[in-house]
């Protein structure tokens, strides 16, 4: 019941955010958004969807490297189908996809659920690391832009600036010392997550096919980035944007995906705000983000439903009693 209530509240929050956001537009602006969507070149969306589908297949094949470390050798078909199903489940209940993926594969391949789920956790840890790398890359590439934003707020006296930096370092030292001793449950959970992240990454670096795993992880995240990038030429106002804008927009969308079920409600707000930093109008940014979110969500739904139907069919002879 609590889980059902959580899902309902999450969907209501997303719907409320989307209604609040769109209600801020005039009727003329809403017509402009719809007009932008209607006249988009569909080929760019098709390219984006193909890349999205490719990332699903690559994720399934990458997962196999982790399973092989446990001497598990499931059928590739089941890997693809359970990955597709997990994306669909995550749209309904956040993080239910990981549990559903492990449960489905364990059922049809007769594997240990705990160990299978452990490989998914390690896989997700690798994804968190690459998201952090993308964020740091955006900060590095946008250093001049960020500096221009904060420069007016910096003290003019260099000695004062050095003093503030020393103070910040001292406060950081005290904070880290407090974290190492605190019994606060929230801090302990965050600390446990970071330790788990480091442990998961160290286990990946010890696996036999680690370089293939890392290479496929890089390709998967480049596909995610390309899915966003290839849709930009569909709108004249975004067609000129470079890698810096792509990274910032992509990261904003990724954060929105974490906040709500598949980014429902939050994705257009976050992505539009990111694109506005590069001079993209609110109407065009909204049209772009709504088109991106809707097309990729439909891909997840259609592909996930196909996987859900095919999974018991292809495993009919292996179905456990």
Image (cartoon, rainbow, N blue to C red):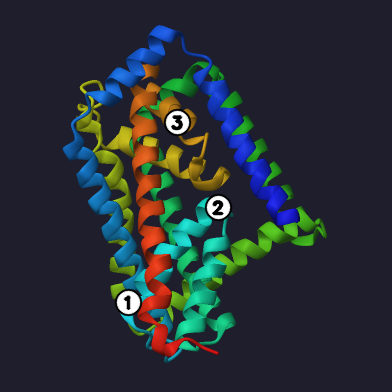
Residue position for label 3: 268
Image quadrant containing the C terminus: bottom right
- Residue at 55% from the left image edge and 18% from the top image edge: 153
Q: CA distance from mark 1 to mark 2?
A: 24 Å
User: Residue 233 vs residue 268: left or right?
Assistant: left
Residue 179: percent from left, percent from top: 74, 56
Image quadrant containing the N terminus: bottom right
Q: Which element type, helix, strand or loop, lies under badge 2?
A: helix
Residue 278: percent from left, percent from top: 34, 23
- Residue at 41% from the left image edge and 84% from the top image edge: 316
Q: Nearer the N terminus, badge 2 or badge 3?
A: 2
User: Residue 162 vs residue 190: left or right?
Assistant: left
- Of 201 and 96, the residue lying toward us: 96
Residue 54: percent from left, percent from top: 26, 59
Q: Which numbered mark, 2 or 3, is in the foreground of this view?
A: 2
Indicate which disc residue 77 carries: 1
Quarter of the image holding residue 171? top right
């Amino acid at each position: 019941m609590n889980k059902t209530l959580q899902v309902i509240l999450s969907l209501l929050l997303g719907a409320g955010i989307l209604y609040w956001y769109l209600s801020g537009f005039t009727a003329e602006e809403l017509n402009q958004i719809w007009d932008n969507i209607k006249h988009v070149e569909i080929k760019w969306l098709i390219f984006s969807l193909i890349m999205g589908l490719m990332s699903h297949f690559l994720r399934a094949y990458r997962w196999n490297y982790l399973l092989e470390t446990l001497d598990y050798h499931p059928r590739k078909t089941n890997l693809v189908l359970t990955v597709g199903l997990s994306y669909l489940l995550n749209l309904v209940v956040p993080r239910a996809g990981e549990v559903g993926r492990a449960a489905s594969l364990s059922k049809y391949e007769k594997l240990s659920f705990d160990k299978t789920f452990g490989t998914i956790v390690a896989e997700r840890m690798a994804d968190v690391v690459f998201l952090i790398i993308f964020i740091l890359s955006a900060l590095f590439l946008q250093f001049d832009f960020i500096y221009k934003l904060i420069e007016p707020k910096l003290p003019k006296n260099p000695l004062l600036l050095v003093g503030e930096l020393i103070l910040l370092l001292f406060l950081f030292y005290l904070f880290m010392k407090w974290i190492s001793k605190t019994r606060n449950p929230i801090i302990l959970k965050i600390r446990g997550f970071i330790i788990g992240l480091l442990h998961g990454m160290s286990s990946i670096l010890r696996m036999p096919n680690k370089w293939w795993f890392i290479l496929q992880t890089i390709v998967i995240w480049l596909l995610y980035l390309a899915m966003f990038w290839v849709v930009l030429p569909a709108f004249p106002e975004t067609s000129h944007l470079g890698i810096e804008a792509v990274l910032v927009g992509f990261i904003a969308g990724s954060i929105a995906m974490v906040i709500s079920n598949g980014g429902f409600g939050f994705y257009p707000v976050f992505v539009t705000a990111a694109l506005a930093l590069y001079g993209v109008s609110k109407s065009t940014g909204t049209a772009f983000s709504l088109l991106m979110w809707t097309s990729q969500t439909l891909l997840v739904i259609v592909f996930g439903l196909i996987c859900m139907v095919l999974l018991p069919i292809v495993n009919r002879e292996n179905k456990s009693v």
